[in-house]
Amino acid sequence: MNMEILLPPKFRDAVDKGILLGKKISIVTYVLGDSGEAVLKYVLSSVLAHVGRPDLMELFYTSAKELIVNSTKAAIKRMIFEEMKLNIQNLEDYEKGMKFFKSNLNERKFPAYKKKMREYGYQVKISCIYKPDKVDLEIRNNFPLIPIEAERIREKFLNAKKYDNLFEFFMEHGDNTEGAGMGITMVEILLSQSGFDRRLFSIYSSERKKETIARVEVPLEIMNTSRNGEQQLFVE
């Protein structure tokens, strides 16, 4: 796939001008296809070139793709619950809905939900905020976590600490990686292998603002990146 052929000059020019002006670059997607991946790659590579850190491309691009998939799954899950007339806040309904969700959904089926996501008003917003000393990546859903999701994400953050590489993770979980926290584990491992504190990755959810944000904050200067035990999930 040739990114330059897929992306129109008008889009590239707009991104390039925005970066020169130091503006936040945001993309809104529903289901990330080939063209969306090309857009994401262009934005991230351009920002990282601008701040002189193209070596961080794998960290940001792979993290973004994993977190976008997680965000898309969260939106599709809510649509499935609504279609099945299940109350996502009810534990019995939640377990019933999740059983169907896990057994019937994989990434090959995502494109079928693109139109439905628009109809339901769900979207995924990817933003890149950058300064000479820092680059932040945000993946935002326009709905909050429910309590059971927040608890399971806390468990996944704790579980991710056990692994130094994805091989160890796959050896323990085998093919049963759906719901096991592979996305969270992968982002943490990528941060660690790039020389950063794993706690630079966090998830924030707000019922008041009706949003959930997965955030990767990478300092570019040589500095102590430790966060002194700061939690990685924030719910308000």
Image (cartoon, grey):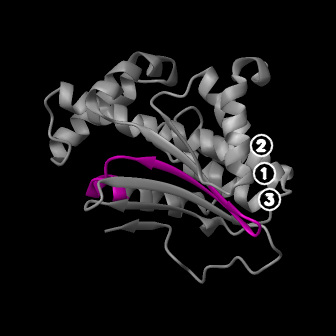
Q: Nearer the viewer, mark 3 or mark 2?
A: 2
- Pick whichever of labels 3 and 2 is earlier in the sequence: 2
- Picture residue at 78% right of the left edge, 51% below the top: 48
Under tag 3, what secondary structure?
Answer: loop
Task: Give 157 or 133, whichever is nearer the viewer.
Answer: 133
- Pick whichever of labels 3 and 1 is earlier in the sequence: 1
The span shown in magenta is 129-151
Q: Residues within 10 Å of mark 2 (few under 14, many from 20)?
A: some
* Residue 177 in view of the camera: no
Q: Is the C-beta separation of discs 3 and 1 under 8 Å?
A: no
Q: In the rendered image, which quarter is residue 4 located in?
A: top right
Residue 42 location in percent, x, y? Answer: 73, 36
Say which residue label 1 marks. 48
Task: Give 50 or 177, whichever is nearer the viewer.
Answer: 50
Say which residue label 3 marks. 194
Residue 47 location in percent, x, y? Answer: 74, 49
Under tag 2, what secondary structure?
Answer: helix
Q: Amino acid at mark 2?
A: Ser
Say which residue label 2 marks. 45
Total labels: the figure holds 3
Task: Give 221 or 173, whichever is nearer the viewer.
Answer: 221
Q: Does the magenta run of residues contain 13?
A: no
Q: Amino acid at mark 3?
A: Ser
Q: Is 83 on the left-hand or right-hand side of 42?
A: left
Q: Is 145 on the left-hand or right-hand side of 58?
A: left
Residue 163 location in percent, x, y? Answer: 66, 57
Q: Amino acid at mark 1?
A: Leu
Task: Relative to 59, say whether 202 is above or below.
Answer: below
* Residue 153 in view of the camera: yes
Under tag 1, what secondary structure?
Answer: helix
